[in-house]
């Protein structure tokens, strides 16, 4: 499968199944577009007719270009066949029963009242609660016991707002550190916070123990304060930004992400990115809202068209800032065209429910944080392990080839089938797709590949 598009002044050709990316001239771009649909003589005739008025392009040039395209096909760098379907599920078979990461819902409560919150203001459509040290300790033991030979284990302190249970966070980290050497494990912790409770103690602890810190900021003050309000309806921007700035400065500007959400209120989210840059933040992520159809925050079709344009302008801004010596990172544009995940990982799909699970304050296991509170997705608990094998199998079987819509999508080996939770909430099946999300993902990938080409060619300098 071939995907062709033009962006940033480049004619880009992606060979989906080999992973080869080509920046080509117009003649090669046009030849590739009809190479497999027409015999050689017809291709050369059509391209010669198109460029008949160009003195700088002769028939001989076109014939030579055709042969170069054909050579790339012979080498497997163009029109490579898809031979991966038989591998689908192999990685999950190999790692079956091995858990490498937990999302600890340390607090099912929050000090903000964000209307677009997928977690129903942090309580996940249930009772407000915080995780006890005993439950958290058992969760860490469960992770160690089920991690097989894996050395590196990931734990995300999540909520609600995890800093509302900060003492337990600290005790759990101390416990994990105390067993690392004995168990031959290395814990890597992440903290996701809205910032309201950040103080010097939090900053010192996070910088000492957290591999990454995710900070919730939606960008412009008027946008952020539209949704991210306290229970009195007051915006949180002025309260949290100085705290975020102190924390990031203390971390040396590394190992953090400003994580924002854009909605119907701000499809022009690039302005929010610029606000974050003006505030001194350079590790950025902005996510499209995922909500029920008809929700006031929902991105409409016209909104998504604006967002697509914003993604292109964001790519241009990134390259321009790199030329100025002021680079920044955008999470969704991080792509490695020369390495990256192996093919088994690319086709296996999300590890939710298999190698990754969420733990509620009561110790219940769910496939990921977006399924918490939906009883039919309860996998078990941290004491007895998984006791709902049928549910787990639905995630085990969920790979890029299990979704019929993915088979003809050029981006499938980059998204690996997408988010099972978004698919379920959109279609009622974890093997469905969330088409609005797919649309935006494809645009992000086009932009990310264009940026990689510009950097490879030195056009960012």
Image (spheres, helix red, strand yellow):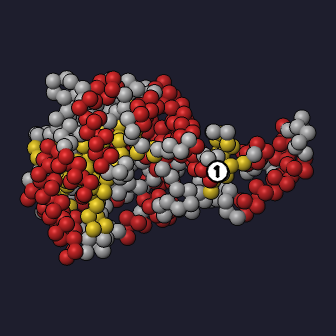
Q: Residue at x 79, y 45 (%)?
A: 27
Label 1, residues with CA under 10 Å away: few <14, some 14-19, many ≥20: few
Q: Which residue is mark 1?
A: 458
Q: Nearer the viewer, residue 99 or 132?
A: 132
Q: From where the camera sits, is residue 153 visible?
A: yes
Q: Nearer the viewer, residue 28 or 420?
A: 28
Toward which corner of the image does residue 8 lie, by quadrant?
top right
All told, the count of numbered labels is 1
Residue 56: x and y in percent read 89, 42
Residue 341: x and y in percent read 47, 61
Q: Residue at x 31, y 71 (%)?
A: 150
Q: Residue at x 35, y 68 (%)?
A: 95
Residue 9: x and y in percent read 67, 39
Q: From where the camera sits, is residue 118 visible?
A: no
Residue 142: x and y in percent read 18, 65
Q: Nearer the viewer, residue 297 or 451?
A: 451
Q: Residue at x 49, y 60 (%)?
A: 340
Position of 210 compared to 341: left or right?
A: left
Q: Is residue 349 above or below residue 5?
A: below
Q: Nearer the viewer, residue 314 or 43?
A: 314
Position of 83 compared to 415: left or right?
A: right
Element at label 1: loop
Position of 216 compared to 303: left or right?
A: left
């Amino acid at each position: 499968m071939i995907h062709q598009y033009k962006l940033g002044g480049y004619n880009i050709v992606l060979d989906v199944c080999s992973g080869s990316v080509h920046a080509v001239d117009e003649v090669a771009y046009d030849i590739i577009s009809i190479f497999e649909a027409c015999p050689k003589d017809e291709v050369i005739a059509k391209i010669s007719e198109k460029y008949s008025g160009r003195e700088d392009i002769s028939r001989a040039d076109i014939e030579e270009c055709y042969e170069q395209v054909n050579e790339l096909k012979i080498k497997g760098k163009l029109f490579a066949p898809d031979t991966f379907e038989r591998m689908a599920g192999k990685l999950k078979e190999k790692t079956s029963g091995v858990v490498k990461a937990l999302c600890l819902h340390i607090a099912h409560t929050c000090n903000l009242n964000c209307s677009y919150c997928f977690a129903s203001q942090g309580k996940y459509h249930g009772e407000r609660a915080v995780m006890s040290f005993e439950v958290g300790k058992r969760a860490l033991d469960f992770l160690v016991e089920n991690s097989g030979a894996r050395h590196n284990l990931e734990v995300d302190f999540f909520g609600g707002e995890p800093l509302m249970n900060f003492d337990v966070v600290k005790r759990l980290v101390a416990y994990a550190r105390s067993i690392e050497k004995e168990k031959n494990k290395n814990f890597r912790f992440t903290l996701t916070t809205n910032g309201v409770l950040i103080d010097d103690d939090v900053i010192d602890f996070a910088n000492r123990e957290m591999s990454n810190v995710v900070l919730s900021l939606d960008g412009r003050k008027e946008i952020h304060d539209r949704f991210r309000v306290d229970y009195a309806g007051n915006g949180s921007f002025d309260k949290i930004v100085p705290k975020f700035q102190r924390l990031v400065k203390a971390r040396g500007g590394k190992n953090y992400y400003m994580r924002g959400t854009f909605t119907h209120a701000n499809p022009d989210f690039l302005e929010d990115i610029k606000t974050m840059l003006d505030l001194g933040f350079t590790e950025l992520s902005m996510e499209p809202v995922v909500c029920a159809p008809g929700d006031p925050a929902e991105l409409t079709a016209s909104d998504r068209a604006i967002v697509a344009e914003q993604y292109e302008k964001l790519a241009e801004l990134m390259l321009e800032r790199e030329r100025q010596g002021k680079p920044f990172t955008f999470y969704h544009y991080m792509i490695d065209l020369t390495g990256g995940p192996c093919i088994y990982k690319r086709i296996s799909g999300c590890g939710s429910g298999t190698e990754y699970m969420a733990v509620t304050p009561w110790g219940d296991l769910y496939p990921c944080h977006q399924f918490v509170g939906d009883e039919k997705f309860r996998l078990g608990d941290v004491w007895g392990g998984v006791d709902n094998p049928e549910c787990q199998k639905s995630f085990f079987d969920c790979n890029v080839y299990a979704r019929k819509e993915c088979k003809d999508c050029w981006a499938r080996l980059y998204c690996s089938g997408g988010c099972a939770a978004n698919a379920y909430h959109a279609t009622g099946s974890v093997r469905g797709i969330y088409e609005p999300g797919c649309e935006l993902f494809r645009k992000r990938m086009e932009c990310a590949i264009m940026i990689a080409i510009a950097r490879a060619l030195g056009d960012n300098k």
